[in-house]
Image (cartoon, rainbow, N blue to C red):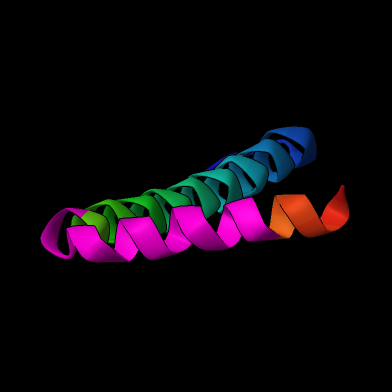
């Protein structure tokens, strides 16, 4: 445990940072594994992103 207030605030901030990074890593891994397991979905995602880009232009 931190004894100074600034040190404890930093410790809490780092804890939240690590929790958020681990959540993002879990989501990225899930996305990667889903695309690896179902490769036909990648074609759908790419096709929809191309259509969205055409609509914006």
Residue 14 location, x and y as percent?
Answer: 58, 40
In the image, 19 versus 36, the foreground residue is 36
For residue 45, which quarter of the picture? bottom left
Residue 48 location, x and y as percent?
Answer: 56, 63
Residue 16 location, x and y as percent?
Answer: 59, 52
Q: Across the whole image, how many numbered discs are drawn on residues?
A: 0
Q: What residue is rendered at 49% in x and 58% in y?
A: 47
In the image, 26 versus 41, the foreground residue is 41
9 to 55, vertically: above or below: above
Q: Residue furthest right?
A: 57
Q: Is residue 49 magenta?
A: yes
Q: What residue is rendered at 38% in x and 51% in y?
A: 28
Q: What residue is rendered at 73% in x and 50% in y?
A: 53
**Most frequent secondary structure within the magenta stretch:** helix
10 to 30, vertically: above or below: above
Give the left or right position of residue 16, taking residue 41 as reference.
right
What stretch of residues is rendered in magenta? 36-51
Give the left or right position of residue 43, taking residue 38 as reference.
right
Q: What residue is rendered at 81% in x and 59% in y?
A: 55
């Amino acid at each position: 445990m931190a004894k100074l207030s600034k040190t404890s605030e930093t410790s809490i901030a780092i804890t939240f940072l690590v929790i958020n990074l681990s959540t993002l890593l879990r989501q990225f891994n899930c996305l990667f594994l889903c695309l690896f397991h179902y490769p036909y979905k990648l074609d759908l995602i790419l096709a929809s992103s191309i259509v969205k880009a055409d609509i914006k232009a």
